[in-house]
Amino acid sequence: MFEVIAWATDGSEAADSALPIVTELAKTVGAKVVVIHAEEFAVGRAAGYPVHVDEDELQSKIRGQIDKLKGEGLDVTLTGASAAVGNAAHAIARVAEDEGAKLIAVGTRGHSPVAGLLLGSVTQRLLHIAPCPVLVVRPD
């Protein structure tokens, strides 16, 4: 059923909360894991600048998580996507569809629905546009 599971991460602790569930589910059903990291850019006159000033550190952390998953015997790939600020959900949905994901797993900070809408929650938007089911994991 879930031959390909996409884990969308921005490198945050909230995103990390979905990883144990992705790992267990992938092991149970023998799924391939596609890690999607959508790098958002603030667009200005001169050029686009990453939203996260520590983007290199985030990518290093994510690569370490991928190495750990591979060490546990999982088939894992990393797919990056670039998006202007506010469009990360669309980039994630597009990559998930291109990769044939049957499930997208994401973490959430647990904002209320109103706060999520005001803050432009990627997870909130993804629930409406994803090409497949979305598993939302709240932090512990």
Image (cartoon, rainbow, N blue to C red):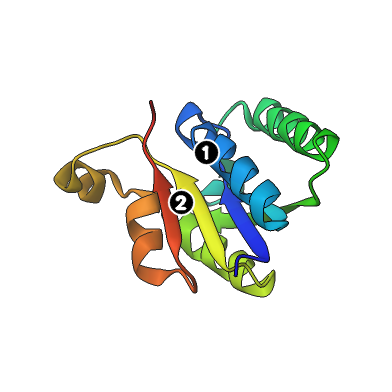
Quadrant of the rendering where the C terminus is positioned: top left
- Label 1: element kind: loop
**Residue located at (69% from left, 34% from top):** 62
Residue type marked 1: Val
116 lies above or below 99 = above
Q: Is residue 11 left or right of residue 90?
A: right
Residue type marked 2: Val
Quadrant of the rendering where the N terminus is positioned: bottom right
- Label 2: element kind: loop
Name the N-terminal-most of marks 2 and 1.
Answer: 1
**Residue located at (31% from left, 50% from top):** 120
**Residue located at (32% from left, 55% from top):** 124
Residue 87 can be seen, yes or no: no
Q: Is residue 27 left or right of residue 41?
A: right
Q: Residue 106 appears at what percent x and percent y?
A: 48, 47
Q: Residue 56 appears at what percent x and percent y?
A: 71, 30
Residue 51: mark: 1
Residue 85: mark: 2
Q: Nearer the viewer, residue 98 or 81?
A: 98
Residue 30 can be seen, yes or no: yes
